[in-house]
Image (cartoon, rainbow, N blue to C red):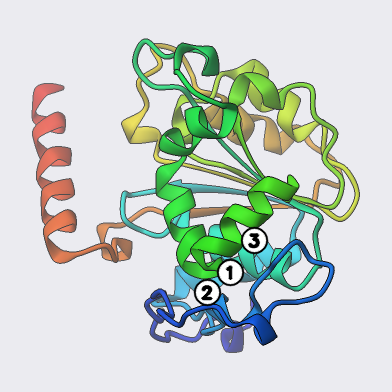
Amino acid sequence: MAKSEKQTLRLQAIEDSGSAPTRSSRSEGTGGIDQAAFDRSPLVPLNDRQGEYIYAINNKPIVLCTGVLGSSKTYVPTIIACDLLRDAKIEKIIVARPCEGKAKSAGFFKGSKNEKLEGWCKPVTDTMKKRLGRGNFEAYLAMGKIELMALEQVKGLSLDDTFLILDEAEDLEPAVAKSVVTRMGQNSTIVIAGDIAQQDLKHNSGLEILLKVIPFAVGLRFTHIDFDSWDYCVRSAEAKAWGMAFEKYEQSLEK
C-alpha cells in the first residue's frame, strides 16, 4: 500500500452526540431514523496498521484480522459498517459471535431473539449505539437492517448487500468458518476478527484454518491484517500492561 495511505493520525473518540431528536430531523419513510443522532465524526487511524485495516475493509470483500487485545479489531469494522448502513450503501449489518461457556445455542438464553443476543454481542452493539444513536440502532434492529446472530445460524445464510462482522473468531469452529466464506454474495463485506492467543478450543480454530487455506486459493480477493505487537494496543496503558504481563506468564508455564 502507498505511503500516503499509511498516515499516522489520531483515531477520534466516538461519543454520543447527546442531542435530543427533533421532528424535523427525522427522515420521511425511513422508519423514524433521526439524521441528527448520527455521529459523523471521521474515522482516522491511530497507527499505520489501523490505516491498512481501514483501507482493506473499504477495498476487499473479505478481511481476516488477528492480533493483540485492544487493537480495535472489532471497533474499526463496526464504525465502517454503521456508516455504510447510514448512507444506504448496504442493506444489512449482521453481527455474529461464538457462544461462551455452557451456552452453545441461542436457545440457552431467556427472552426474544434480540434480547438473547444483544448481551452476547454487547461489545459490538455498544459501539453501534454510539455511532448510530441509540434510537436509530433500535429502529434499524426493528426493521431487520441490523441482525444479531448466533454462529449456528450463520451457516445457512446467503450474504448479498451485507456487512458481516464475525467477532471473537479465535473460537470459530472450522466448519462454520468454511460455511461463512463460501456464502459470500454480491456487494458484501466479511470481517473475521480474533486473537488466536486467546482461543478456548482444544483444536485448530476456524480462523487458523482460514489462514492455512489462503495459500491454496486462486484469485482470492482478501487481506489479512495482523496487529502482531503490543504497540498496536490502543485501549489503555493499563490494558496493554496487563496483556503483556499475562502473555509473559503464560509463556513461562510452557517452559
Which residue shows up at 79% across the image and 37% down it?
217
Secondary structure state at the residue bearing disc 3? helix
Which residue is at the far front?
Answer: 23
Q: What residue type is labelled 3?
A: Ala
Question: Spatial distance from mark 1 to mark 3, Cα to Cα?
Answer: 11 Å
Res 22 quadrant in image: bottom right
Q: Residue 54 carries which label?
A: 1
Which residue shows up at 68% across the image and 68% down it?
33
Res 56 quadrant in image: bottom right
Question: Spatial distance from mark 2 to mark 1, Cα to Cα?
Answer: 5 Å
Which residue shows up at 66% across the image and 16% down it?
175
Q: Residue 51 carries which label?
A: 2
Q: Quadrant of the C terminus?
A: top left
Answer left or right for 128 relative to 26. left
**Structural crowding at the residue carrying mark 3, measured as other residues with C-alpha within 10 Å and reported as few (<14), some (14–19) or many (≥20):** many
* Between marks 1 and 3 in the image, the one whose residue lies nearer the viewer: 3
| Image coordinates for residue 37, horizontal then vertical, percent | 55, 77
> Which residue is at the front of the view, 73 or 224?
73
> Which residue is at the front of the view, 204 or 158?
158
Q: Do the residues labelled 2 and 1 touch (CB within 8 Å)?
A: yes
Q: Which mark is residue 81?
A: 3
Residue 57, placed above or below residue 118: below
Question: Spatial distance from mark 2 to mark 3, Cα to Cα?
Answer: 16 Å
Which residue shows up at 45% across the image and 59% down it?
127
Q: What residue type is labelled 2?
A: Gly
